[in-house]
């Protein structure tokens, strides 16, 4: 790696920007490409770039001027858990072990405590105040677990207005239907609302909070990787 390219990678990581290093083996040319920058000088398509940044895995692609090797330098994926409930107590440590940066968001101080979530990042604010500051992007997943529209709905609205790669919400089909109706009245289309996974989690017959947490995390990872 050229010194100038290395400095660019270091600068991007310090500033929290995700970049892809593109290298053409045929002539050794390299460039750093950021999300949303379009086709690079080495012919890297923007959609391919976005997918590499989302998945976080290196790959070789073919361009008009020969193969190009793409290596992403990205932040860990983030998981924002809305609702410091029993399922969250299992989900948070599992997601942390799986490599996610986890934030627990719940304005109810009796729920979002360090005793219940040791070592977790806790945000004790209402979602309509907190979500904008969290900077949702294409490496962020949001799960809403409270069943309380005053907490879940503002979080989902912020998520729907973002590029978050996963949105999920706990609740029965009746609860999901009522939620879709409320969010539809807020101006979201059926296509928008189809982004919300609900009932949340893979259909593995989960019953206990721990099992539901496994199903949710598996679905989040699938959305990130597949």
Image: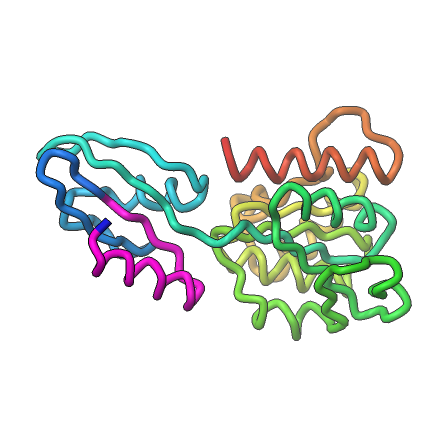
Q: Which of the 4 image quarters holds residue 62? A: top left
23 vs 220, nearest the viewer: 23
Answer whether residue 19 is magenta in the image. yes
152 vs 99, nearest the viewer: 99
Q: Position of residue 42 (x, y in %)?
A: 15, 44
Give the extent of the magenta segment.
2-22
Q: Residue at x 41, y 61 (%)?
A: 13
Which secondary structure type mostly characterizes the magenta part of the structure? helix
Q: Which of the 4 image quarters holds residue 157? A: bottom right
Answer whether residue 110 is magenta in the image. no
Q: Position of residue 36 (x, y in %)?
A: 31, 56
Q: Residue at x 29, y 40 (%)?
A: 70
Q: Residue at x 66, y 34 (%)?
A: 218
Q: Position of residue 116 (x, y in %)?
A: 87, 58
Indicate whether 215 appears above or below 53: above
4 vs 175, nearest the viewer: 4
Total marks shown come to: 0
Q: Residue at x 28, y 57 (%)?
A: 6
The coloring applied to the image is: rainbow
Q: Position of residue 204 (x, y in %)?
A: 75, 24
Indicate whether 133 appears above or below 199: below
């Amino acid at each position: 790696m050229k010194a100038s390219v290395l400095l660019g990678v270091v600068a991007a990581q310090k500033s929290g920007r995700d970049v892809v290093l593109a290298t053409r083996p045929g002539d050794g040319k390299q460039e750093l490409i950021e999300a949303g920058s379009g086709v690079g000088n080495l012919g890297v398509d923007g959609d391919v770039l976005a997918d590499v940044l989302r998945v976080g895995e290196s790959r070789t692609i073919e361009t008009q001027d020969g193969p190009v090797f793409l290596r992403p330098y990205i932040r860990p994926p983030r998981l924002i858990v809305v609702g410091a409930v029993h399922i969250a107590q299992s989900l948070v440590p599992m997601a942390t072990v799986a490599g996610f940066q986890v934030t627990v968001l719940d304005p109810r101080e009796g729920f979002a405590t360090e005793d219940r979530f040791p070592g977790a990042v806790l945000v004790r604010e209402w979602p309509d105040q907190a979500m904008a500051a969290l900077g949702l992007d294409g490496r962020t997943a949001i799960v809403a677990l409270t069943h309380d529209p005053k907490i879940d709905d503002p979080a989902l609205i912020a998520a729907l207005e973002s590029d978050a790669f996963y949105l999920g919400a706990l609740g029965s089909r009746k609860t999901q239907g009522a939620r879709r109706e409320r969010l539809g009245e807020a101006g979201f289309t059926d296509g928008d609302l189809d982004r919300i996974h609900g009932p949340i989690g893979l259909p593995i017959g989960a019953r206990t909070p721990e099992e539901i947490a496994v199903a949710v995390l598996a679905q989040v990872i699938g959305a990130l990787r597949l």
